[in-house]
Amino acid sequence: MAGLKSLAKDTAIYGVSSIVGRFLNYLLVPLYVAVMPASGGEYGVVTNMYAIIALLLVLLTYGMETGFFRFANEKGGDPMKVYSSILISVGSTSLLFIFLSLLFLQPIANFMGYREHPEYLGIMLLVVAIDAFLTIPFAFLRFKKRPIKFAAIKLFNILISILLNLFFLVACPWLSQRFPDLFTWYNPEYRAGYAFIANLIASVSQLIFFVPELRGFRYVYDSALMKRIFRYSFPMLILGIAGILNQTVDKIIYPFLFHNEAEAHIQLGIYGAASKIAMIMAMCLQAFRYAYEPFVFGKSKEGDNRVMYAQAMKYFILFTLLGFLGVMFYLDILKYILKPDYWIGLRVVPIVMAAEMLMGVYFNLSFWYKLIDETRWGAYFSGIGCVVIIALNILFVPTYGYMASAWAGLAGYTTVTLLSYFIGQKKYPIAYDLKSIGKYVALAAVLYIAGEYIPIGHVVLRLLFRTVLLLLFLAYIVRNDLPLQHIPYVNRFMKKK
């Protein structure tokens, strides 16, 4: 129980930073859709670019983040030697990537559909190289159990990005009209470009905070150690590529699935904007992952902790179901994050949220092959899921548009989750509380259907009814798995009473 309390504490810190950070990033969505009309397709360009960058980030970190936790926690190992070796490796490949990318920027831009704006690609390639390098110092902070500094740097990066976006997209148009001589450099039609420039400045600004983590120790590259790490991490690279493709491939291949490139960016912009509302699941997963990965590898040194892993899975599903209902029940309010011309895409929200939840379940399941050093299974599963998603996108997106992408993602994650569960139960069996989990899923489904399909015309009455349904779900959680007397502050209050 003490281990779960430690996990809960770190998850809370990472969670606050992740949720606050994502919420602040949400502020960019209404800004972008306000200055980038759906009919222009500019937000589609932004969505496409960030999908490409997400894939490149996985390639440039090539599984070293998980490899660091695995070998830094190895009995008798030297964590600083592991950190130094991986830092040198990732730093070197990031520099080589920048050099080659800038050298062949125009041909790459032509292929990716950015012939008229190769600088868009150049800016974001610099961003991804910097972010890939900083992944290792961020992992080091997690290893050292320093979630507060981790969270502070993440939030600083987001705040700087938001302020710069506001400057370029809101302040500059206003100032350029009143002081044209001082803003001759400003191009009001370069909106997507300014969004990328803001990201670059924010990424570079993080470097100063990692000075303590990049100095004060001897840099050593242990080639024998790195061979072991590469052997362990290479399947994680394949897994990571397949995993990120599962999340982003629809957004990457959109320009190649439509004869009309403008139409592709318009649909992609609507799909990308609507999907942002569903990202509450990504917040929950990211917060849980930041705390859970070092927790699991740390606990693996203490012996078999399968009961604790099963409990963690149950609570993860429980709270993601709560998040699903919360978003869907208050979609009448959340939709105002977007301009009305993007509301047509709100149909994808429940589908994307369900896919995100399954991705979280798959992440929890994935630790069986990491703990027994058979990471190739992760590559197999994610590869199969990726094939499912790509095939369904190619077959159905030209006809059904972004709705096909949403369903393809759900189908892909359902496939990998089932494969990982059934094979994992043979290789590293964990007694998950399927009966209790099934009850929660069934109750959430019934409440969701009631909230969505019982016709209540007045929006206020509809929200009140859905609030009652959400409270019923919360009450069921408290009654069965989170008794009030087990919560320290509430327990103290109840004793006084």
Image (spheres, rainbow, N blue to C red):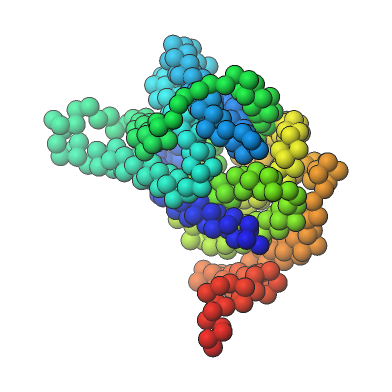
Quadrant holding the N terminus: bottom right
Residue visible at 34% across and 35% down in the picture? 208
| 99 over 249 or under it: above or below | above
Q: Residue furthest right?
A: 426
Does residue 344 appear to the left or right of 174 in the view shown? right
The x and y percentages for residue 165 are 34, 40
Tell which of 167 and 16 is nearer to you: 16
| Relative height, residue 165 to residue 123 (above, below) | below
Residue at the image point whose x is 68% and y is 45% from the top: 301
**Residue placed most toward the observer, 361 or 81:** 81
- Can residue 70 be seen by looking at this rendering? no
Residue 469: % across, % down: 62, 71
Q: Position of 34 compared to 481: left or right? A: left
Q: Residue at x 36, y 38 (%)?
A: 209
**Above or below — where is 213 with respect to 223?**
below
The quarter of the rendered structure image containing the C terminus is bottom right
Residue 195 appears left or right of 234: left
Which residue is drawn at the image coordinates 71% and 43% (left, top)? 367
Q: Is residue 77 above or below residue 450?
A: above
x and y, in percent, of residue 73 in the image:
62, 39
* Quadrant of residue 485 within the rendered picture: bottom right
Residue 246 percent location from the top left of the image: 65, 36
Q: Residue furthest front?
A: 76
Q: How many marks?
A: 0
Is residue 82 at least partly visible in the picture?
yes
Looking at this view, is 448 or 40 the one in front? 448
Quarter residue 55 falls in:
top right
